[in-house]
Image (cartoon, coloured by chain):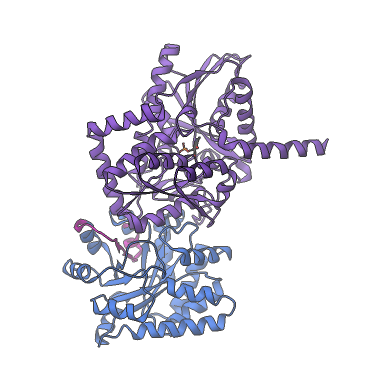
Amino acid sequence: MSRYDQMFQRLKTENAGAFIPFVTIGDPSLDRSYAIIRQLILSGADALELGLPFSDPIADGPTIQQANIRALESDVTTQDCLDVIARIRQEFPDTPIGLLLYSNLIMAKGLPTFYQDCANSGVDSVLVADVPVRESQPFRNAAKQAGIEPVFIVPPHVTDETLRAVASYSRGYTYLLSRAGVTGAETKANMPPEVMINKLLEYRAAPPVLGFGISSPTQVEQAISAGASGAISGSAIVNIIEQNLHDQNSLLEKLGKFVTEMKAATVRN
Amino acid sequence: MTLAVCSCQKLFVPALEQLEQAYIAAMDDDAFHSEFNALLKDYAGRPTPLTLCRNLTEGTKTKIYLKREDLLHGGAHKTNQVLGQALLTKRMGKTRVIAETGAGQHGVATALACALLGLEARIYMGAKDIDRQQPNVFRMKLMGAEVIPVTSGSGTLKDAVNEAMRDWASTYEESHYLLGTAAGPHPFPTIVRDFQKMIGEESKQQILAAEGKLPDMVLACVGGGSNAIGMFNDFIKEEAVKLVGVEPGGKGLDSGLHGAALAVIDKGIDSTGILHGAYTHIMQNPDGQIEESYSISAGLDYPAVGPQHAHLKAIGRADYVAINDDEALDAFQVLAKKEGIIPAVESSHALAYALKLAKESPEKEQVLLVNLSGRGDKDLAHVHAVLSEQNKQNTESK
Ligand SMILES: Cc1ncc(COP(=O)(O)O)c(C=O)c1O
């Protein structure tokens, strides 16, 4: 059973959803980023969604763009990021780790090599932000070869055909957008997710997890009671990093508090 | 995956599908074609002339013909395809247009089409480009467009594309992204080519009328690739005609300061990758991080090239060469002095390569067809500043 399956099974017995924080690896530096990621798990994160820094993150709003820039300014390479994951994996053998990235980072290494490197460092899933499901076959094949689970996003205003394809190809979990647009905590989640969640369940998709614009415990609660199996929060987390760049201790403390509150909101009552 | 097949951005796949359908329907609709053609003729001034240079190639046996897209309304070839896409915008029932611009020529074309057709225009432009293309910024504003400075990244065209795509991801229900070149995700490269292909079709008729035969070579500058693919398209099947795309060599290919994604392949650099939803050739580092391009010409300052050119290069049908800043500046001045035409700095790259060929083989009888994609009014202040600086340095070193 995959780490995601094990996690969702455990959460079922706890009558809770998953809380999955997102950060960009290497933001603001490799060492600090390692400590930040550790803190996320220690404070209650069920799984991690980690971004590989990219020069042109077109699916991201200003907050995560800045995170990418900070990481690249400290000369972080793809291998450095995978090394951080390997360190985390050693300490936390059970936490599912997803990678979110842009396709050119994969192309640069070659598909088989890239996915194998991911597997070697303990990555569970890879979500390619700029490859839609209809063009995803080479990526899916390479993922399968290496034993990596490909995750797909259900885009807004999706056709039934695309939804079925996402449902059948996404492994580990299904990434459901809570609104149209790029990432960011400035624009709140605004789409009623129930309809889509029910359809995904009907099509036997991997557990739907809601993301984009989720920045408060209330939104996590809403996502879970709408039937989502979890919630991803990115920009709100990265905001905390950005606002505490000068002081790593207070950064870790605030991050820990936020994650604990968000996690608490995943429990169904 | 084969080269030239596009990969799309998943956040606006529905918008791309809608665009593709609207485009296919429009292509089958006579009313669309007659409206487009009427606008091209009565508003934009098509067909544009073909001019044989009288003095430029003196002392050689080369004839250079210029396809005068500089005389098109708006001052560059950009107006052609913008009118087409603006009509598609109306067909899709959308009211708002987003665009990116580098030199400002695509922004100007978008602004004028939106003014004409009653659409709202929001134009993203790199902050660095805003500085070097002031007159075009004012033109866009005069025609009612909103110009939004982009400071992220290098503050040039690629960053403006990023910002425009982010806007589109959340607004596509009422907005059309009017992409300015033959790059980006499918169906843009196809649409842009089809709305620019009259350049080559007219040129072919005109040169046959003038020379009684096809040219030996067709040349065009390549930024994203729209004027070049528009010029090349009708000649691709004419195997005897050489096709040459001229990329911005900046300060030289070895300096790293250039925008020549295709010309570097001949230097052994593998530049295949994915940017802005197209699988093509890109300037990048070993990790796949996109590098900042450099060129004196804002319109060519883009680190990738459209997938059709990647394909023409791959099958060996077209050659791609680089012309550096100084060579382009020389051609800019020579055309002004010898023919009384001030070309865009972008188009000067294509002309510079034609002049180089004429000089290299003065005894060779050859007919070269150059796409003069735009006029140089927008570049006057920038070129003036660069030349003054060079003069100053020359006097100081004497
Ligand atoms: C006059 C002119 N020529 C060429 C270009 C380059 O674009 P493309 O390669 O799409 O023709 C531009 C772009 O702004 C331009 O203004």
Q: A125 above or below B72? A: below
Closer to us: A101 or B102: B102
Chain corresponding to blue in the figure:
A
Residue B178 occupies quadrant: top left
Chain corresponding to purple in the figure:
B
Q: B375 above or below B216? A: below
* Residue farthest to the left, as pictured: A202
Left or right of B388: which side holds A192? left
| Residue ID at (62%, 15%) | B58
Residue span colored magenta = A141-161
- Count of picture labels: 0
User: Dividing the image into 4 quarters, which one contains the N terminus of chain A?
Assistant: bottom left
In percent of width and height, residue B273 lies at: 44, 49
In percent of width and height, residue B278 lies at: 39, 47
In percent of width and height, residue A210 lies at: 31, 71
User: Dividing the image into 4 quarters, which one contains the C terminus of chain A?
Assistant: bottom left
Q: B131 above or below A148? A: above
